[in-house]
Image (cartoon, rainbow, N blue to C red):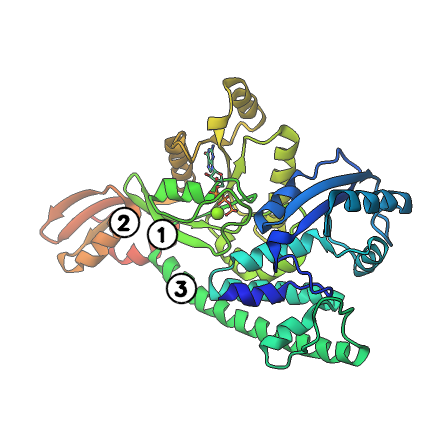
């Protein structure tokens, strides 16, 4: 149902959006980079978006040409290759300036789509919750506003649509653009207000969880690193897992136990290099909340090549910094070690001595991970000696959940308990504290 709506959403001004008629989309990939050329991630993004790839061309240069992305000579080569391979779309491995995009489309005479638009398109496709959809729509509108492309498709939904956005339409006229801009801005403010509201609802839920005093752990990491698989392995849940990028958009929280103590574990949206800033902004509320956890477990895919691994780790660090989570306590997990030989494992433990090596898929290393998580929290546990009256059975079972195994003794005055309590929950049990008193 939303498919149809989103289908119009991503239309370019040629009416040949990436999403509609995906089956017929054949993209030729281009990328400008000062480093070793590698368009494998762009290929993966397109695969996830359901677009076929006909070929690729890279130009090594310090930075993309400010007007045309590639140099003129190279563009001629692209043009020839596009024709030869039968592509009907050019996909660029960077976010283009509106000017670059316009010029490229003119020179190549074929629709051009940039990395940001592709990622936005995948997000739009994968958004499940009402909030996720609002967040993606906001990000898309921000992106479109800078380009004035396809705005009428959003307006259509508001009942103020233009009808002439079909193939060959070069875009709305000037006055229409002004109207579109204003309506788009109105819609943006409306979306922001609605997101603020959902944020308020969520923070009430969080307060309730915090009152429960359970320690919180968030899984963060590059897309496809295996976060959801790890969540499932640790909590015995069934959160969606797939070999595609950005499978998870909505944070899912589950509880699990280590030595009888309960913890809350939250799965989050995957990160990627050059993550569109519009998305980081739109998702910041959800991310902020998830990443405000007591401990962030950074899950990395250890099966990729060394250089890529470092780039992915850095990309995740960047997004964590951007969302203000840079200073949270962190634990690094190297996942998918089932795909590595002994030598590579040793190499990794040499390079990342503090990281825990696991295979979420095979269940390997999970005990070591649990121990590492527990060790982190044990250091913040307060030893308490409590006398809990028999009338307070509820508090006692709560204490059980928080502190796991208890040392307890029944006395005439109540249950005498020695427990290690998470710092956040100490206050709640203070009234039972013996503070050295004898019973
Ligand atoms: N071999 C191997 N594959 C794994 C392991 N963990 C996850 N995978 C696979 O990696 C792919 C991605 O796993 P997910 O758990 O969906 O990854 P994610 O980090 O949640 O991805 P996003 O939600 O897209 O950010 C799936 O095909 C998993 O089966 C592992 O330990 N070993
Ligand atoms: Mg996931």
Q: Nearer the viewer, residue 399 or 337?
A: 337
Sooner in the amino-acid sequence: mark 3 or mark 1: 3
Q: CA distance from mark 1 to mark 2?
A: 9 Å
Residue 92 % position (x, y): 74, 49
Q: Nearer the viewer, residue 172 or 271?
A: 172
Q: Are marks 3 and 2 in contact (CB under 8 Å)?
A: no
Task: Decide if ligand 2 comes within 8 Å of the CB at mark 2.
Answer: no
Q: Are marks 1 and 2 in contact (CB under 8 Å)?
A: yes
130 shown above or below 279: below
Secondary structure beneath label 1: loop
Q: Which residue is mark 2?
A: 401
Secondary structure beneath label 3: helix
Q: CA distance from mark 3 to mark 2?
A: 19 Å
Q: What numbered label is drawn on residue 205?
A: 3
Residue 80 % position (x, y): 83, 44
Q: Name the side, left or right, on which 123 lies relative to 113.
A: left
**Callout 3: few (<14), some (14-19), or many (20+) C-alpha neighbours within 10 Å?**
few
Q: Name the side, left or right, on which 382 lies relative to 330.
A: left
Sooner in the amino-acid sequence: mark 3 or mark 2: 3
**Callout 1: few (<14), some (14-19), or many (20+) C-alpha neighbours within 10 Å?**
many
Residue 48 % position (x, y): 57, 48
**Callout 2: few (<14), some (14-19), or many (20+) C-alpha neighbours within 10 Å?**
some
Q: Name the side, left or right, on which 361 lies relative to 343.
A: left
Q: Which residue is mark 1?
A: 214
Sooner in the amino-acid sequence: mark 1 or mark 2: 1
Residue 12 % position (x, y): 70, 63
């Amino acid at each position: 149902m939303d498919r149809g709506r989103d289908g119009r959403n991503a239309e370019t001004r040629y009416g040949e959006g990436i999403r509609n008629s995906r089956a017929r989309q054949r993209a030729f990939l281009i990328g400008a980079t000062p480093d070793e050329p590698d368009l494998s991630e762009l290929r993966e993004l397109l695969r996830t978006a359901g677009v076929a790839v006909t070929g690729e061309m890279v130009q090594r240069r310090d930075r993309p040409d400010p007007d045309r992305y590639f140099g003129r000579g190279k563009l001629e080569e692209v043009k020839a290759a596009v024709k030869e391979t039968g592509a009907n779309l050019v996909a660029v491995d960077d976010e283009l300036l509106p000017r670059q995009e316009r010029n490229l489309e003119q020179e190549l005479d074929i629709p051009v789509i940039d990395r940001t638009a592709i990622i936005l398109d995948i997000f739009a496709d994968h958004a499940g919750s009402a909030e996720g959809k609002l967040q993606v729509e906001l990000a898309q509108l921000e992106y479109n506003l800078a380009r004035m492309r396809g705005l009428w498709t959003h307006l259509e939904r508001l009942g103020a649509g233009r009808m002439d956005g079909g193939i060959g339409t070069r875009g709305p006229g000037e006055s229409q653009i002004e109207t579109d801009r204003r309506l788009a801005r109105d819609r943006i403010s409306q979306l922001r207000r609605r997101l603020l509201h959902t944020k308020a609802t969520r923070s009430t839920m969080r307060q309730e969880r915090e009152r429960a005093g359970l320690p919180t752990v968030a899984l963060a990491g590059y897309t496809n690193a295996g976060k959801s698989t790890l969540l499932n392995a640790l909590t015995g849940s069934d959160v969606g897992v797939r070999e595609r990028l950005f499978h998870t958009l909505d944070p899912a929280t589950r509880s699990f136990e280590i030595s009888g103590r309960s913890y809350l574990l939250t799965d989050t949206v995957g990160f990627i290099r050059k993550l569109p800033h519009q998305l980081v902004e739109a998702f910041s509320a959800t991310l902020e909340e998830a990443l405000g956890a007591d401990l962030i477990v950074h899950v990395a895919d250890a099966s990729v090549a060394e250089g890529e691994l470092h780039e992915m780790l850095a990309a995740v660090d960047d997004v964590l910094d951007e969302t203000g989570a840079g200073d949270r306590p962190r634990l690094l997990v190297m996942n998918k070690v089932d795909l590595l030989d002994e030598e590579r494992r040793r190499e990794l433990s040499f390079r990342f001595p503090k990281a825990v090596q696991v295979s979420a898929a095979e269940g390997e290393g999970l005990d070591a991970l649990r121990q590492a998580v527990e060790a982190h929290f044990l250091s913040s546990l307060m030893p308490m000696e409590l006398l809990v009256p028999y009338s307070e059975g509820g508090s006692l079972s709560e204490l059980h959940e928080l502190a796991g195994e208890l040392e307890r003794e029944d006395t005439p005055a109540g249950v005498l308990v020695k427990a290690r309590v998470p710092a956040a929950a100490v206050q709640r049990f203070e009234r039972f504290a013996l503070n050295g008193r004898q019973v």
